[in-house]
Amino acid sequence: MVASETMDIDVGRVVAGKYELVRLLGRGSMGEVWSAHHLTLGEHVAIKLLTQAQGEALESTTAATARFQFEAQVAARLSRKTRHIVRVTDHGEEDGLAYLVMEQLEGETLEAVAEREQRVPAATVTKIVTQVARALTQAHGEGVLHRDLKPANLFLTRDEEGKLLVKLLDFGIARAIHAHRAPSAFATAKGLVFGTPSYMSPEQAIASPRLDHRCDLWALATIAYEALSGALPVAGTDTDEILRNLCAGRTIPLHERRPDLSPALDAFFRRAFSGAIGGRFQSASDLAQAFARAAAVGDEREAATEPPDAEPTVRGGALETAPRMDRRRRARVTVLATGLSLLALLGVAMAWRALAAAPSATLPPSAPAPRPPTAAAAPLPAAVPLPGAVTDLPPPVPVASPPRVEPRAPLATAPARPSLSAPAAPPTPAVAAPTPAAPLPAPAPPPPAKQVDKSQVF
């Protein structure tokens, strides 16, 4: 007797004495997922119930229950290591009804986005592939295969910063790699194939006993192909036709569905769908990096290292991408900024050259009085008179010179500025001309002394 026939599952039912069912979120061949209210914590959770009908049973109740418990253990263990796997908080069995409690997410599945948008931008697909690859890396590192990767099992939500966050759901038919060599209660019955045919690798479709983690890589590449093109890489109107084309290696090149995309993406999918399993990508991280490089080429260019403002987000259940400046416009702005910088530097250089070539200003009237020159002192440079300045000045008052000392040979240096030739002895100190703003008082009649020859200013 199965659980669905012995228990009435409906709104208001309390499971395990604390989870009150609120509304049905989804139903599959192996169970139902409900939104439930935790009576003691006061929070909402998602609870998965194993409710396969007897007429649709694919395996015994014992095997299904054991597999259900295995899913809870795997998801709980892996979700502690990566945020890209839905978190499991509780599981158990009550009156023959197996249940699994998970975090309740806000957003939508990739399947819902693809149905609405038809084609998902390459930039968003890059983000999805990268994050799913992180989840698979953890699962494969634990020796666990998902075996049912598809858009319906990829949930798109947002993190605390509003950025896209992908969660991997439903490890319901997950299988440990060692189970191929040591059958257990949750191992698939001989000849029975679990999974979704459109996303299966050829090895999974023929139930190969050597199935390994690369079946999940095939499924992830199929998800990326479908998100970009809006169609599957293997054509078929029913399961049998799909599996025949799959095992025969008849995959449709991406350029036949999206000729506008980069040829690099064509090359990526040729390798991902190679007939020889050794010719495909061998790890989830390698696949994600190769896809990011291929998607960064061409008109829909967007590498995995784009700045945060381009991060796709989920708002109101729909994916939105932050506005981005067009590449041509960015190039024009860059060229303009570079030109303006060069013009500014040229202007600074011309101004500096003009200042260097300008004549030096005269000393202000408040400059200290000139000191008597020593025998070794060089004559000071004469000031260049400004227009309108008073130049007919009285000669300076003679100052007694100290005892003459024989000077050493002068250094052979050229004067930096024009100098005023002075009398042989004693040297006459230079006097700066006053500025027009401060007129000098009327000078006293000069004594009969030798005047400065102005014609010697050169």
Image: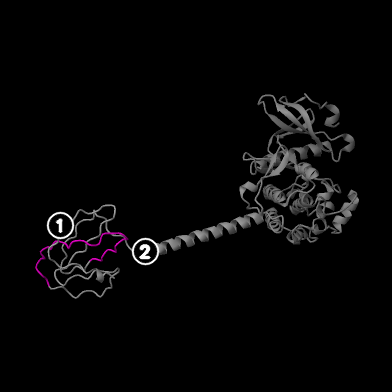
Residue on which the image places disc 2: 358
- Mark 2 lies on a secondary structure that is loop
Q: Earlier in the sequence, mark 1 or mark 2?
A: 2
- Looking at the rendered structure, the kind of residue marked 1 is Ala
Along the line of sight, which residue is nearer the eye, 168 or 338? 338
Q: Quadrant of the N terminus?
A: top right
Q: Is residue 21 visible?
A: yes
Residue 11 versus residue 299 in the image, above or below: above
Specify few, some or many for label 2: CA neighbours under 10 Å numbering under 14, 14-19, or 20 or more.
few
Residue 440 versus residue 62 in the image, above or below: below
In the rendered view, does 304 fall on the left or right side of 279?
A: left
Q: Quadrant of the C terminus?
A: bottom left
Main secondary structure found in the magenta portion: loop
- Residue 160, given in percent of the width and then of the height, sits at 62, 38
Residue 76 versus residue 256 in the image, above or below: above
- Residue 85, given in percent of the width and then of the height, sits at 69, 42
- Write down the quadrant of residue 38 in the picture: top right
- Residue 104, given in percent of the width and then of the height, sits at 71, 34
Name the mark nearer the viewer: 1 or 2: 1
In the rendered view, does 458 fall on the left or right side of 304?
A: left
Q: Residue furthest left?
A: 403
For image coordinates 81% across by 60% down, the residue present is 275
Residue on which the image places disc 1: 444
Give the label on residue 284, or none.
none
- Residue 101, given in percent of the width and then of the height, sits at 72, 33
Along the line of sight, which residue is nearer the eye, 368 or 407? 368
Q: Is residue 278 visible?
A: no
- Mark 1 lies on a secondary structure that is loop
The residues bearing labels 1 and 2 have C-alpha atoms spaced at a distance of 36 Å
For image coordinates 78% across by 36% down, the residue present is 65
